[in-house]
Amino acid sequence: ALLGGAKVLLCGVLIGRMYQLQVLDSDRYKLLAEENRINMRLLPPPRGRILDRTGLPLAVNRENYRVVLIAERTEDVMKTLDVLGGIIPMGNNERRRILREIKRRRSFVPTTVRENLNWQEVSKLAINAPDLPGISIDVGQSREYPYGTQASHVLGYVAPVSEKDLSGDPLLELPGFKIGKSGVEKIYDLKLRGKGGNSQLEVNALGRVIRELSRQEGQQGDDIGLTVDL
């Protein structure tokens, strides 16, 4: 009788707990599960242009082609780098840097191998894609000054964010994001920076991206017109 009563009591406790989890707290755990499945990522916006008084662009954005390596998509990282080195030459220091970054990251996270590729290098990589498992071409943006050093003392320059530049803006924490460090680029940085977009990704329990559910591009920064005549 005692054992039977204990069993009934234990079953009652378990049933009550299951009812609480499945019925009473179902909305809460459903929300937690959705938040775990859906990952929101911030997208950097295009930086605004700087123009002279006649409308000539003094600072613009250009497409930046870069090659990235996803370790989990190749059986032998060293062999892939050897083949890649025959297409775009790589020094020993650059190779060590790539291997160091691969070890620090999860195997499905892309590692940047080389930036600012020219069109000829991109074409070679595309042609040799079957021999380069795990290698892909990514397109970003970088700042360009069409007239070189002319008016550089006025325009200034952009550079990666440092610790002292962090102000709570999530854009500043994005890898590779650059801000104005001097001149017009610095003074009007907030206007030139724009507003970030977002990408809604479906991920698994390990954080691996399965697919992109939605995408909202960021708002490009404002153009700044100067009184300076080039």
Image: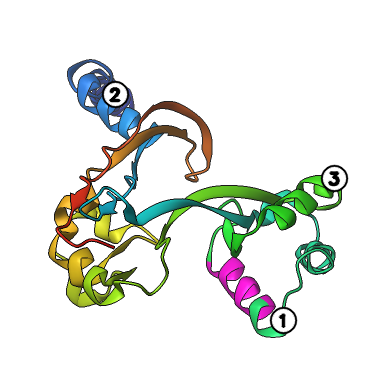
Q: Which residue is mark 3?
A: 130
Cα separation, mark 1 vs mark 2, equals 51 Å
Specify the amino acid type for callout 3.
Answer: Pro
**Judging from the image, what secondary structure is the residue with disc 2 in?**
helix
Q: Is the residue marked by circle 1 packed among few (<14), some (14-19), or many (20+) residues within 10 Å? A: few
Q: Is residue 177 magenta?
A: no
Q: Residue 168 location in percent, x, y?
A: 15, 59
Specify the amino acid type for callout 1.
Answer: Gly
Specify the amino acid type for callout 2.
Answer: Lys
The reply to whether residue 1 is in sight is no
Cα separation, mark 1 vs mark 3, equals 23 Å
Q: Is residue 110 left or right of residue 4?
A: right
1 or 3: tag closer to the N-terminus: 1
For the residues bearing labels 1 and 3, Cβ distance under 8 angstroms: no
Magenta residues, start to end: 95-104
Quarter location, residue 100: bottom right
Q: Is residue 98 magenta?
A: yes
| Nearest to the observer: residue 168 or residue 20 | 168
Q: Which residue is mark 2?
A: 30
Q: Is the residue marked by circle 3 packed among few (<14), some (14-19), or many (20+) residues within 10 Å? A: few
Q: Nearer the viewer, mark 1 or mark 2?
A: 1
**Image quarter (top left, top right, bottom left or bottom right) of the N terminus:** top left
Q: Residue 214 location in percent, x, y?
A: 40, 25
